[in-house]
Structure formats: C-alpha cells, structure tokens
C-alpha cells in the first residue's frame, strides 16, 4: 500500500524523500513556454557561477531535448564525454544499446514528436581519478526539473535510467538497490495512477556484467518495454 501511494503521485513531479539526425536547437514542436525555458536551461551557468560544491571543471554545455508532443520521456543521468562534444544525447555506445533496448531506429529516437530526453544533469560532470563519470550535478534538478516537467503534461511514460532518475521520479517507492528497483518493474507499472514509470539500468558497457547476472531483464522486461514503446509511437 505504501508503494502504491508513493507511485500514485505524478511521475512528472519531484519525488519527496521520507545514422544520427542532429537535434535542432529549438525543435518546432515545442510550445512557446517550453521553448523559452529550454533556452534558459541551455544558457545555464549555475554549476560554474553558483556551484553546490566544486565548480564544473570545464565550460558548461547543457544537453536536453524537451518536447510538447512526445508521450515518452527518457530520464537519464548526465551527458558523457562524447555527448559533451556532440551536443546531442546518447551519441555513444550507451545510446546504441539503449535504442536496441527500446527497439527503435535513430530517426525514431531523435524525433521530438516521439521522445523527450531530459537527463538529471544537463552538463557532462567530469570524471573521477579512475576515469569514471562523476554523478550528475545537483544544481540541475533543483533549478530546472520541476518546471520542465510541468510544461510537458502529455508525457505518459517515463523511463528512469539509473538510480539518480529513479530517486527523483519514484521517491520512497524506489527499492534499496537498482537491481531490486528494476526487478520490481511490474509492481511499479501496475501501481502508477498517473504517467507510467519504468525503471531501467544505465545502458553503459559497465553494466554488461549486471545484464549477464540478471537475464530476466532481457527476457521479461525488454519485450514488455518494446511493446509499450511501439504502442505509443504508432
């Protein structure tokens, strides 16, 4: 019952704790208000000028693709090095794997009438001493996320990719670990009263071992995910 109550809250609000086609700078399907807000996000310099902790170690380059028409939103973590260079989400091996999971072509994936892509952190956060990407910057969600979600009320499926997105969109309904959260995907799906939420692991190569240890993900969750994606795209 507690899990059902937690998921009944809209997934578009912040959870309370207890062949690649270029993406247009201003996609034509965005509402005027959403376009205006997206422009402000792309000009954001909070992580350099008013950082929470250490400032971003490089010039900010926010990457996001909001949409006023897409029914599906990808809530990922933060851009990696290749996306920081390209300025286009998921232009890397993780993107290839993610599109395979979804069962979509690059043209479908980058169609702003089909998918909105709004990560938890908009800029590449840098890397640690071992060369792993740092967590998404905390400034992004605090400053922008709730307002962006409020301007995309047509979203009825949120794919939460990784623990940071799951914490924000699922709140106390999220499991104690990513594995438990993703394993319980059907319970989350059935309990949602508003937009559906489907938790996914990050498609990074670093999770290849996780995929091998959890074959149910590819056997059970992915076929269901692809059918729901295709239903909304058609």
Image (cartoon, rainbow, N blue to C red):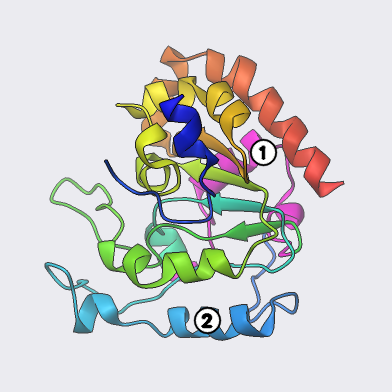
What separation in Å lies between label 2 and label 1 (alpha carbons)?
A: 28 Å
The residue sitting at 76% across, 53% down in the picture is 108
Q: Is mark 2 on a helix, strand or loop?
A: helix
- The front one of 78 and 146 is 146
Please give the residue where the numbered disc 2 appears in the rendered image: 37
* Label 1 neighbour load within 10 Å: few <14, some 14-19, many 20+: some
Q: Please tell me in which quadrant of the rendered image residue 223 appears.
A: top right
Residue 73 location, x and y as percent? 61, 53
Decide: is 203 above or below 89: above
Residue depth check, mark 2 versus mark 1: number of the one nearer the observer: 2
* Label 2 neighbour load within 10 Å: few <14, some 14-19, many 20+: some
Question: Magenta segment: does it hold 82?
Answer: no
Q: Please tell me in which quadrant of the rendered image residue 170 appears.
A: top left
Residue 51 location, x and y as percent? 18, 74
Range drawn in magenta:
85-112
Q: What element carries label 1?
A: helix
Position of 127 with respect to 200 (left or right) is left
The tag earlier along the polypeptide, 2 or 1, is 2
**In the image, which disc is placed on residue 102?**
1
Residue 50 location, x and y as percent? 19, 80
Residue 19 appearing in the image: no
The residue sitting at 39% across, 33% down in the picture is 174
The residue sitting at 54% across, 57% down in the picture is 91
- The front one of 29 and 6 is 6
């Amino acid at each position: 019952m507690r899990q059902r109550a937690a998921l009944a809250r809209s997934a578009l609000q912040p959870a309370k704790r207890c062949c690649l086609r270029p993406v247009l700078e201003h996609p034509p399907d965005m509402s005027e208000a959403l376009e205006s807000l997206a422009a402000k996000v792309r000009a954001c310099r909070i992580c350099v000028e008013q950082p929470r902790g250490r400032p971003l170690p490089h010039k900010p380059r926010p990457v996001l693709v909001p949409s006023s028409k897409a029914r599906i939103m990808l809530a990922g973590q933060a851009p990696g090095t290749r996306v920081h260079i390209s300025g286009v989400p998921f232009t890397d091996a993780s993107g290839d794997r993610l599109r395979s999971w979804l069962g979509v072509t690059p043209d479908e994936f980058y169609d702003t009438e089909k998918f909105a892509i709004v990560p938890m952190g908009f800029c590449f956060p840098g890397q640690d001493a071992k060369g792993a990407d740092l967590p998404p910057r905390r400034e992004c969600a605090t400053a922008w996320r709730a307002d962006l979600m409020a301007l995309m009320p047509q979203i009825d499926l949120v794919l939460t990719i990784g623990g940071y997105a799951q914490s924000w969109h699922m709140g106390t309904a999220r499991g104690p670990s990513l594995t438990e959260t993703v394993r319980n995907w059907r319970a989350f799906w059935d309990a949602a009263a508003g937009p559906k939420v489907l938790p996914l692991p990050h498609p990074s190569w670093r999770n290849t071992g996780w995929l091998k240890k959890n074959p149910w993900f590819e056997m059970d969750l992915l076929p269901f995910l692809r059918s729901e994606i295709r239903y909304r795209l058609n």
